[in-house]
Image: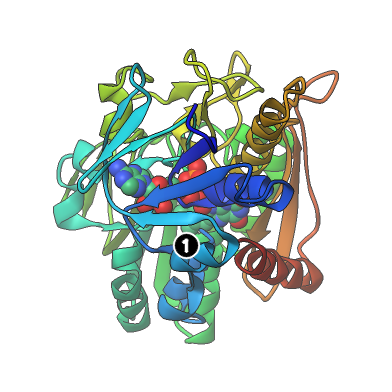
Amino acid sequence: MTDIPHVVILGGGFGGLATANEIRNSLPLSKVKITIIDKKDWFMVGFAKLWIINGTRTFENSIGDLKQLQKKEINFLQDEILSIDLQYKNVKTKEDKIPYDFLVISLGAVLAPQKIPGLIENGYNLYDHNQLSEIHDKLQKIKSGKIAIAIMGMPYKCPPAPFEASLLIDSMLRKRGIRNDVQIDFYSPALITLPAAGPEVSKKILELVNTEKIIFHNSSKIKSVESNKLIFENNEAEFDLLLAIPPHTAPKIIYDSGLAKNSGFIPIDRDCKTPYENVFAIGDVTSLVVTENMAVPKAGVFAEGEGIVVAKNIISKLQSKEASELFDGKGGCYLESGRDSASIIEVDMFSESKPSTSISEPTPENLISKFEFEKERLSKWL
Ligand SMILES: Cc1cc2nc3c(=O)[nH]c(=O)nc-3n(C[C@H](O)[C@H](O)[C@H](O)COP(=O)(O)OP(=O)(O)OC[C@H]3O[C@@H](n4cnc5c(N)ncnc54)[C@H](O)[C@@H]3O)c2cc1C
C-alpha cells in the first residue's frame, strides 16, 4: 500500500456516490484517499428522466455536479476508463493510469439498442438522457394513433419504471383531452408485469395499468423493429411512436477484464467481493442471485445499499478490524401512477423464508416522499 491507502471508485452513480460518502464520513483524508472516476461530470436520480419526458422537469434542473465532491475531499476525475489491470492494481483512463489499494466497480449497466435490428432507426430509447426532450416533444404533438412501450431484454434497470412511464404518459394525454384517441400498448417478454416482485405485486400493477386502459401484452419477445412495426417471435404489432427499453449489458471493459462473461454481469455474493483481493463490485454492473429464478433487481436503492456495505468493510479493513458486513437486500422503490400519486414497492430479498415484496396503495404522500428521496440523495452526496 502507498502511505495513505487509496480507494478508487469506478462510476459516480448511485453506488459510487454512496460508497465514497460513507467512507469519507467515517475517515478523514489523512487516513484514506478517495477518487471517483466518471466520464460525465453530473449525477441524476434515474426517475427524474420520466419527469423530463412528462415536461415537469428539464435536464438542467435535475442534475447534481460531481465536481462538488472536491469540497468533501473526494477527488473527482472526469475521464473515460479504458481498462482495469487487476494484477498490477491500476486503472487506465484516456488521460492517466491510477493505482489503487481498494477498487470499487460501480459502472452501471450499458444500454444496447444496437442488439435489436431496426430499433435505433425506428424507435426511441426511453432510458437515454439524450432522447428525453425529443420524446417529450413527440408526446406533446401526437393527436391520435398507437404508442408502444416495449421492454426488449431482461434484466433492465428499475423494473417498475416502464410501467410508471406508461402511466405518466396516460396522464399527459388525459390532460390534453386526447386519451381516447391514443392507444397505449405495453409489451414485455415476461409472463407477468414485474417478475422481480412476484405474482401478487404483478397482479396489482396489472390492475393499475388496466384501469387506465393501457394494454399489457405479455410473452412478447422482440426480434426486430421495422418502420411502424414490431416483429416479435410469435406475432407482429403496429405502432406510431415506439418507446423502448433496450437490452442491457455490462461495460466492455468488464468483459475485457474477465470479471463477467458473454453479455452477463459481474457475479457477486452479499459481501460484494470479486475473486480479486480488495476489489468489490456493486449495483447494476453486478448480478446477485437470490433464488434460482430471481436476482436482486437493478435499482439505485440496491446499488446504494451495496455501496454502504462495501464502504463499511473497507473502513473495517483500514482499521484492522473484521470486515463482515453483508448486504441485507432490503429496499423500497416508487411506482408513480399518474394522477399525482405513487405507490411504494417494498422488497426484502433475503428474508428468512423467501424473498418478500409488497406494494402500497397509490397516495399523494408517497409522491412527496419520492421528491424527498431525490432531494436527500443530491444534498447528502454532492
Ligand atoms: C427511468 C428510470 C427510473 C428509475 N427509477 C428508479 C427508482 O425509482 N428507484 C431506484 O432505486 N432506481 C431507479 N432507477 C435505476 C437506477 O437509476 C439505477 O439502478 C442506478 O443508477 C444504478 O446505480 P449504479 O451505481 O450501479 O450505476 P449508475 O448510476 O448507472 O452509475 C454508473 C456510472 O458509471 C459511469 N461509467 C460507465 N462506464 C464508464 C467508463 N468506461 N468510464 C467512465 N465512467 C463510466 C457512468 O457514466 C455512470 O455515471 C431508475 C432508472 C431509470 C432509467
Label 1 crowd bin: few (<14), some (14–19), many (20+), radius 10 Å: some
Q: Residue at x 76, y 20 (%)?
A: 322
Q: Residue at x 15, y 46 (%)?
A: 118
How many labels, in total? 1
Q: Residue at x 77, y 66 (%)?
A: 366
**Horizontal and vertical percent position of residue 79:** 29, 52
**Horizontal and vertical percent position of residue 306:** 64, 36
Q: How is the image coloured?
A: rainbow
Q: Quadrant of residue 125?
A: bottom left
Q: Is residue 140 above or below residue 145?
A: below
Does any atom of ligand 1 lie closer than 8 Å to the CB of label 1?
yes
Residue found farthest to the right:
352
**Horizontal and vertical percent position of residue 340:** 68, 76
Kind of residue sitting beneath label 1: Phe
Would you say 261 lies left or right of 193 here? left
Front residue of 325/189: it is 325
Q: Is residue 232 visible?
A: no
Front residue of 276/71: it is 71
Q: Quadrant of the C terminus?
A: bottom right
**Horizontal and vertical percent position of residue 9:** 47, 41
Q: Is residue 263 visible?
A: yes
Would you say 327 lies left or right of 177 here? right
Would you say 174 lies left or right of 11 here? right
Q: Is residue 327 above or below residue 136?
A: above
As helix, strand or loop, the secondary structure at mark 1 comes to: strand
Front residue of 207/223: it is 223
Q: Residue at x 45, y 34 (%)?
A: 285
User: What residue is shown with label 1?
Assistant: 43
Residue found farthest to the front:
3
Q: Is residue 221 above or below residue 35?
A: above
